[in-house]
Image (tube, rainbow, N blue to C red):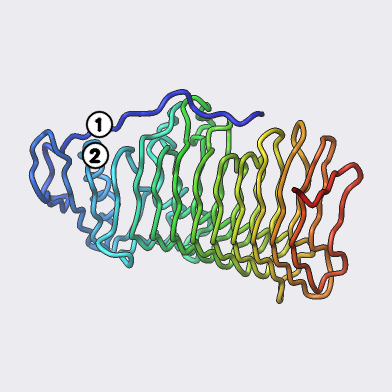
Amino acid sequence: MAHLRPAVRRVLTVASLTAVVAAAGVAILGDADPAEAARITATCANNDGDAARIQSVIDGSDEGDEIIIDGPCLITSTVLLAGDRTYRGESPTTLLKQADNRNLPAVLASKSWADNDATADGRVVLRDLTIDANAAGNASGGDGVLIRAWGCVIENLHIQNAKANGLHITSIARDGTTVAPTGGMVNGRIHGLFIDQSGQNGIYVEEGDNAVTDWNLTETWIDETGGDAIKLENSAGWVIERNHVYNVGGAGINADRLYATSLSDNYIEDFATYGIETAVQGDAASTITGNRVFQFSGTGTTYVAITRVNYGTGNVAVTGNVIRGNGSGTGLSYQRGGNQLTVTSTGNLVTEVTTQRSVGSGVNVTAGV
């Protein structure tokens, strides 16, 4: 219920790769001294053996190693990412594409998810790749990238054509095992992604037991989703700012469990349900500030909404947002459910809607100090 932070942090150990298999298309760059991390290249052949080649390199690596993928790569089985490693493409256009008729749960996924571990993986750094989940070639299937690790850096990826979610952050393993808050999936950073044509959500944060908190999601573009562009079952401690989402089949941003959360300077256009939809925890206050929420050709009619308070008294500052409707709907909606809500609401510009602001019974709205 209340926002928790893990009592422990993992310590990253650094070792080296001691043996590789030449047939796996592996090259070691730099010193292989056991005291140092190795830089290893997995070279794909754009055929059915590529997933096994990449996995062989990962399975033979040690904590601290950097794994470079030289594509294009044809992915026939989910590549499992071990923790405490860096993964990157030779360039941002290095392509990993799911083969036809494979129906994979994800193109890339954390090893702890596949192994049904009770704890999340150590840090994963993932960057500079183009990931095509090939929805057209697979009757069913899952995500582009699935992460179950703490302290991650996920940046400069192009993720496209996922049957389910473009990027899926989850504390729940394949068999339903959840990461406890004390095991933690905190302190991640998502930056500079381009996600397009996701059948479900562009980015989906799935929560089991209050473990996925205190991440930053910044400067990302999400286009053409079947569901929400950004969906967070837990947004406690998150900073969500300077993202641009458009042509959204659900909500632009759907953030549950606001607790010391910042939603700022996001640009949302053309959505089917809500521009920004939130639910609030009691205790620590959150901010919804400086967002631009526009409707040109979408069908959604509520632009910025607090739909409920989950427990206690919710406190939110809603300031300086710009809302431009298409002639109908509600610009700002503040509802409390069965608990208490105080909103500082000031400096918002709301035009071309039927109702500029809707305030539910018992909600305390102030101009602030």
The crowding category of the residue bearing disc 1, from other C-alpha atoms within 10 Å (few below 14, some 14 to 19, many at least 20), is few
Q: Quadrant of the N terminus?
A: top right
Q: Earlier in the sequence, mark 1 or mark 2?
A: 1
Image coordinates for residue 185, horizontal then vertical, percent: 47, 35
> In the image, 2: left or right of 101?
right
- Classify mark 1: helix, strand or loop: loop
> In the image, 267: left or right of 322?
left
Q: Decide: marks 1, 2 in contact (CB < 8 A)?
A: yes
Which residue reaches farthest front? 369
Image coordinates for residue 225, horizontal then vertical, percent: 60, 63
| Cα separation between marks 1 and 2 | 7 Å
> In the image, 7: left or right of 265?
left
Tell me where residue 120 sits by quadrant.
top left
- What residue did someone put label 2 on? 64
Q: Residue at x 42, y 37 (%)?
A: 150
Q: Residue at x 79, y 64 (%)?
A: 301
| Residue type at the position of mark 1 | Thr
- What residue did someone put label 1 on? 13
Image coordinates for residue 177, horizontal then vertical, percent: 52, 29
The crowding category of the residue bearing disc 2, from other C-alpha atoms within 10 Å (few below 14, some 14 to 19, many at least 20), is many
Image coordinates for residue 364, horizontal then vertical, percent: 85, 44
Q: How many marks?
A: 2
Q: Residue at x 59, y 61 (%)?
A: 265
Q: Residue at x 23, y 54 (%)?
A: 68
- Classify mark 2: helix, strand or loop: loop
| Residue type at the position of mark 2 | Gly
